[in-house]
Image: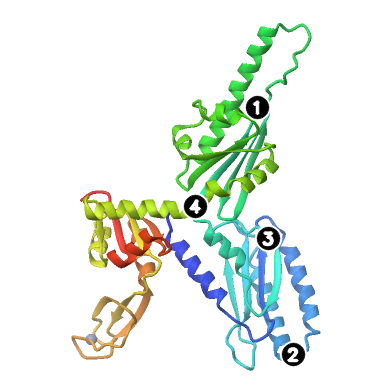
Amino acid sequence: MAHSTEGYQFKKTVKFLKNLRGQGTELISIYIPPGYQIAEITNKLRDEAGQAMNIKSKRTKKNVSGAIERLLGALKGYRKPPENGLAVFAGDISGDPGGGKIELFLIEPPEPVGIQTYRCDSTFFTEPLEEMLEAKEWYGLMTVDRREATFALLKGKRVEILRSMGSRVPGKHRAGGQSHKRFERLIEEAAHNWFKKVGEYASKNFGEAKVKGVVVGGPGPTKNAFMNTDYLSEVVRRKVIGTVDTSYTDEFGITEMMQKSDEILKGMDIINEKGLVNRFIKEATVGKLAAYGEREVREALNNGQVETLLLSESITMKRVKYTCPQCGEEYEKTVKGAQGEKCPKCGADMGYEEEDIIEEMAELAGTVGTAVEMISTDTPEGEQFMNGFGGIGAILRYR
Ligand SMILES: [Zn+2]
């Protein structure tokens, strides 16, 4: 998956929230799924506000009540949850002994919120958002036999059922009066139409680039017969990474598949990353369509040459923008951490703003329509990318 700037910022926000601590059990997290009634949440919050009156610690009581008030205020702006629902966090994270410095964080997540929850704890409840971060790739799951087909997408740890459909293929028992041959022909025709319909749906939903692999399940040999014909588009057929025998073809069949697909799906994220890094290294060493090192990659990005920008998650460098408050002199630098500098023109103390270089380069990539891939250092390839190429690389469209 291309990691957009938005995705990176979301990741950063989640990490930030995860590390915050309250002094007591006073940080409130609420999750609202799409389509949920906001009024139900506000009623719940009012209940909680009533119960907060019983809290013994004066400071905690003040902070919990304050947080609930802020949450109620924030929800007033919504008649219904946004497309993917909402995650809202409120609490005093200042560490100030007096308390009452409530901060509010309102997040419209990149994927649908799957749970409705209210939590009050000494930390924010960020696990559902963290799970979204894990969903770097999607996998298409489908079960099929002559009677039924179910389609789902695996996004990280979450399985999203897309659709179940039933066929009109007649059973094995023919109606009285029909000739055996005619009956057989009717069945085959119905089966052909059914598989065509199933194939079209799969091709449409699993064809997109985000879907990295497809697993096909179902009882008996039907699924294999289905896959070996051209009911599936070539793009999707090439994505099939395995088949699984399941007893069912409904939603339970998908669940069954998940239980049996560990081996097939294991490490797919890693395999994708390895492929990408290997392609980059090959281009960098024997081919031509690669650039590495910050300066060269930056130049290639600005020229629109970059197909995919590869950034190692281990990069800690900052991009610092210096501005002179006196004469307006400006320049940028990549450093480990910003330090005060004197203006080279007038000698005044320069003002500066720093940003993670990952974020800065991802933003630059975004402005020129280049896909960004974050590379871990969990694989030997990822390590080589960081240590041998500085963690900043590009696969080029052309030289
Ligand atoms: Zn100056």
- Circles 1 and 4, Cβ within 8 Å, touching? The answer is no
- Circles 3 and 1, Cβ within 8 Å, touching? The answer is no
> What crowding class fits label 2: few (fewer than 14 Cα within 10 Å), some (14-19), or many (20 or more)?
few
SS assignment at label 2: loop
Q: Which residue is mark 2?
A: 57
Q: Which residue is mark 3?
A: 115
Marks 2 and 4 sit apart, C-alpha to C-alpha, by 46 Å
SS assignment at label 4: loop
**Amino acid at circle 1:** Arg
Residue 213 locus on image (x, y percent) = 49, 44
SS assignment at label 1: loop
**3 or 1: mark nearer the eye:** 1
- Circles 2 and 4, Cβ within 8 Å, touching? The answer is no
In the picture shown, does residue 317 fall above or below 220?
A: below
User: Do we see residue 192 in this rendering?
Assistant: yes
Identify the residue at horizontal 52%, vertical 72% (top origin): 15
Quadrant location of residue 367?
bottom left
Q: Which of the two discs, 3 and 1, labels the residue nearer the N terminus?
A: 3
Residue 326 locus on image (x, y percent) = 26, 87
Q: Which of the two discs, 2 and 1, labels the residue nearer the N terminus?
A: 2
Q: Which of the two discs, 1 and 4, labels the residue nearer the N terminus?
A: 4
Q: Which residue is mark 4?
A: 137
User: Do we see residue 370 in this rendering?
Assistant: no
**Amino acid at circle 3:** Ile
248 or 99: nearer the viewer: 248
Dot label at residue 146: 1
Marks 2 and 3 sit apart, C-alpha to C-alpha, by 30 Å
SS assignment at label 3: loop
